[in-house]
Image (cartoon, rainbow, N blue to C red):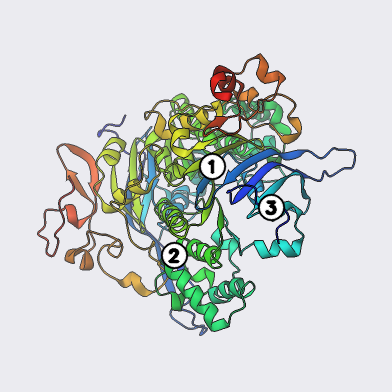
């Protein structure tokens, strides 16, 4: 059942998404925390979403499948996935999409798995609640998926509980679970921030490789640009509830246009020689209710000029690489047309 | 920065710490033989006055246990830790108070390290009044305000509670609290891991700035190699409760010798260089609860691509790589020792 005709080739098309939280007091207005997010994700594409904590990365990820807090609400905008607008679906219809068409890998594999169920019970629950197959068939699917994520001796693992396996293996099990129903999109929300560097490298390369070979699109959320630099095709930089820069990951890193992206790269310890002071972006991200009509980054930007305080910059559309910045868009008028 | 003539500020010799784990396997029988986890297994380390020593390693290698032992929060089972030549586990009650004033800790998670019901000011004043009970309260408050300024926090935030601060501000408050009693030595257990990249830069700068102002000595535990490369003078790599390589920063990052160090460096993400598949380790950190601690030989043997016969039955010792050119570079690996080896057919690395 599709509510609207397929308008484009994009697998996921988020347009002008505004999400707010119900305020605690009736006299306070509800403030938008996501303020007009638009992006497209094509089949088989690996997209990174980078930003500091509080920028709205996780809210954006959970807004796509509406797994967010009960007080959050999509105020405006569309989330078109495989031709249907997820924002218009009721909870029963959403359940058909969650897990089945969109898989999710969360940050902490320990809290993401149920500690009182064996891995078999959890994997089979995912498979059997969406597919009409027998338990033994579902078990074969689960074993196959565990092998795909390189879990040694999957038959014995199935009988074990989450606390009996290591953190890296736990995260691999959650990846297997997300892949179990052959979804078209996997959303991975900081999948490695609870893991060590050696595990991190392995999980990221496994995730990106699996998505690539199965033709699954990946939305990889991280706060570390150097982690996504070589694992994704395209990259979105998020700041204060907006996308401030988007482009092919390679271009974006080699030729960052938005002062915030430039700051993120310059702040990496590897960018300055040992003993020197590191570059730091001054100040901190404004709260959602403090944002007026100026550019959200203006108070921290070293290039801010008069226009930045008066008018919110817009994001040029239909460009391979674009930034939400007056400096970029006015300095290069020939590209903006 | 350091000279060989100076006596080390902190020295750790033959340290062992064992914890009792639940009974073997899933046995329900209460008399079953208990298991032991060897969290620290014969560790030697020295920290010189005024240097920054970073200890890196995966989770489960014993970093946090070592931090707790150095702080005197745990007692070692064997071996000793001495500070300025005095063994800390033998200190009298009174001398221990003095030790605790001179050595302070910054904890990993700035969210849980502060009491949510105490204001920032309360958090800062409390350790000061504990250690210097003769101090007037107003004087302590003045000192706390000055310390807040020194770590870059607006003193108007002093009356706020931790939940009203951002992650970076909370970590600054943690650092300010550690500095309140004018310590000489700071132990920081993963001070950056809960923070964003942009906040990490601020905290790294703050640590460097405080070190040069107050001649602090840092012992920093981390698994963030990019940050370690930026701030360390010397780096010790820990694996399975032991130091497997220790060297100055330049040597460790330019010529890592131990296969584990090479794997760690290869796995650390870099923004402009694509990751390599070289030096990749197989498998996980060994689960040290089951029986296999009686296994002999090098603890990395199951994951090491270069493991050969000697590694299976003999544990490697820390030895100097080249005493003349690199006096500070020590590594524990059979592959680098001149002893004859069999069944090993890889090309030498360097």
- Classify residue B283 by image quadrant: bottom left
Q: Position of residue A218 (x, y in %)?
A: 52, 52
Reading the image, the residue beneath label 3 is A5
Q: Residue furthest right?
A: A27
- Compute the Cα span from label 1 to label 2: 24 Å
The residue under the point 44% across, 26% down is A277
Q: Are marks 1 and 2 on the same chain?
A: yes
The residue under the point 51% across, 85% down is B29
Camera-nearest label, 2 or 3: 3
Secondary structure at badge 1 equals loop
Q: Is residue B4 left or right of residue B103?
A: left
Secondary structure at badge 3 equals loop
Q: Earlier in the sequence, mark 3 or mark 1?
A: 3
Name the quadrant of the N terminus of chain B.
top left
Q: Is residue B183 left or right of residue B169?
A: left
Secondary structure at badge 2 equals loop
Packing grade of label 1 (10 A; few <14, some 14-19, many >=20) is many
Reading the image, the residue beneath label 2 is A149
Residue B264 sits above or below residue A325 on the image: below
Camera-nearest label, 1 or 2: 2
Camera-nearest label, 3 or 1: 3
Q: Position of residue B98 (x, y in %)?
A: 50, 40
Q: Is residue A296 visible?
A: yes
Q: Is residue A159 visible?
A: no
Q: Chain of mark 1?
A: A
Name the quadrant of the C terminus of chain B.
top left
Q: Earlier in the sequence, mark 1 or mark 2?
A: 2
As drawn, the label of residue A223 is 1
Q: A118 or A6, which lies in front?
A: A6
């Amino acid at each position: 059942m599709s509510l609207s005709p397929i308008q484009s080739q994009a697998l996921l098309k988020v347009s002008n998404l505004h999400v707010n939280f119900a305020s605690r007091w009736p006299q306070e207005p509800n403030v938008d925390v996501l303020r007009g997010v638009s992006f497209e994700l094509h089949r088989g594409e690996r997209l990174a979403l980078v930003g500091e904590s509080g920028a709205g990365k996780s809210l954006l990820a959970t807004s796509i499948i509406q797994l967010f807090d009960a007080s959050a609400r999509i105020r405006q905008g569309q989330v078109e996935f495989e031709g249907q607008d997820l924002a218009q679906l009721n909870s029963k219809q959403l359940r058909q999409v969650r897990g089945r068409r969109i898989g999710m890998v969360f940050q902490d594999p320990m809290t993401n798995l149920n500690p009182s169920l064996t891995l078999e019970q959890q994997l089979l629950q995912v498979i059997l609640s969406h597919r009409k197959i027998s338990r033994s068939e579902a078990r074969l699917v689960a074993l196959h998926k565990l092998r795909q994520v390189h879990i040694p001796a999957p038959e014995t693992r199935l009988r074990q509980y989450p606390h009996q396996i290591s953190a890296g293996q736990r995260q691999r099990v959650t990846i297997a679970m997300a892949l179990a129903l052959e979804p078209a999109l996997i959303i991975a929300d900081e999948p490695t921030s609870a893991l060590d560097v050696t595990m991190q490298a392995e999980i990221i390369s496994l995730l990106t490789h699996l998505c690539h070979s199965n033709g699954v699109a990946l939305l990889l959320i991280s706060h570390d640009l150097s982690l996504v630099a070589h694992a994704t095709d395209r990259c979105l930089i998020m700041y204060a509830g907006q996308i401030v820069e988007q482009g092919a990951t390679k271009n974006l890193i080699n030729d960052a246009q938005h002062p915030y992206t430039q700051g993120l790269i310059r702040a990496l310890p590897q960018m300055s020689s040992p003993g020197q002071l590191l570059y730091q972006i001054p100040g901190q991200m404004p709260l959602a209710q403090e944002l007026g009509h100026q550019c959200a980054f203006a108070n921290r930007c070293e290039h801010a000029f008069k226009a930045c305080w008066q008018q919110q910059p817009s994001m040029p559309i239909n460009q391979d690489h674009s930034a939400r910045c007056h400096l970029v868009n006015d300095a290069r008028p020939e590209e903006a047309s | 920065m350091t000279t060989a003539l100076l006596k080390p500020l902190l020295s750790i010799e033959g340290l062992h710490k064992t914890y009792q784990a639940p009974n073997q396997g899933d046995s329900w029988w209460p008399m079953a033989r208990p298991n032991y986890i060897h969290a620290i297994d014969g560790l030697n380390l020295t920290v010189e006055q005024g240097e920054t020593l970073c200890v890196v390693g995966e989770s489960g290698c014993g970093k946090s246990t070592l931090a707790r032992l150095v702080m005197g929060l745990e007692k070692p089972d064997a071996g000793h830790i001495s500070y300025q030549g005095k063994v800390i586990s033998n200190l009298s009650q009174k001398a221990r108070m003095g030790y605790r004033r001179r050595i302070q800790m910054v904890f990993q998670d700035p969210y849980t390290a502060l009491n949510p019901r105490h204001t920032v000011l309360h958090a800062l004043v409390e350790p000061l009044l504990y250690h210097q009970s003769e101090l007037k309260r107003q004087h302590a408050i003045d000192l706390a305000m000055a310390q807040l300024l020194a770590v870059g926090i607006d003193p108007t935030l002093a009356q706020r509670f931790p939940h009203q601060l951002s992650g970076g501000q909370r970590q600054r408050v943690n650092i300010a609290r550690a500095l309140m009693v004018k310590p000489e030595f700071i132990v920081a257990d993963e001070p950056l891991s809960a923070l964003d990249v942009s906040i990490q830069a601020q905290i790294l700068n703050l640590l460097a700035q405080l070190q040069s102002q107050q001649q602090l000595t840092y012992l920093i535990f981390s698994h963030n190699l990019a940050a370690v490369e930026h701030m360390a003078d010397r780096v010790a790599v820990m694996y399975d409760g032991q130091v497997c390589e220790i060297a100055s920063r330049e040597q460790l990052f330019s010529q890592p010798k131990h296969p584990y160090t090479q794997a760690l460096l290869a796995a650390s993400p870099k923004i402009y260089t694509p990751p390599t598949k070289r030096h990749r380790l197989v498998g996980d950190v060994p689960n040290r609860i089951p029986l296999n601690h009686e296994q002999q030989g090098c603890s990395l043997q199951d994951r090491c691509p270069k493991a050969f016969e000697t590694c299976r039955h003999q544990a490697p010792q820390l030895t100097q790589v080249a005493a003349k050119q690199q006096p500070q570079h020590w590594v524990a690996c059979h592959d680098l020792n001149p002893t004859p080896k069999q069944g090993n057919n890889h090309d030498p690395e360097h």
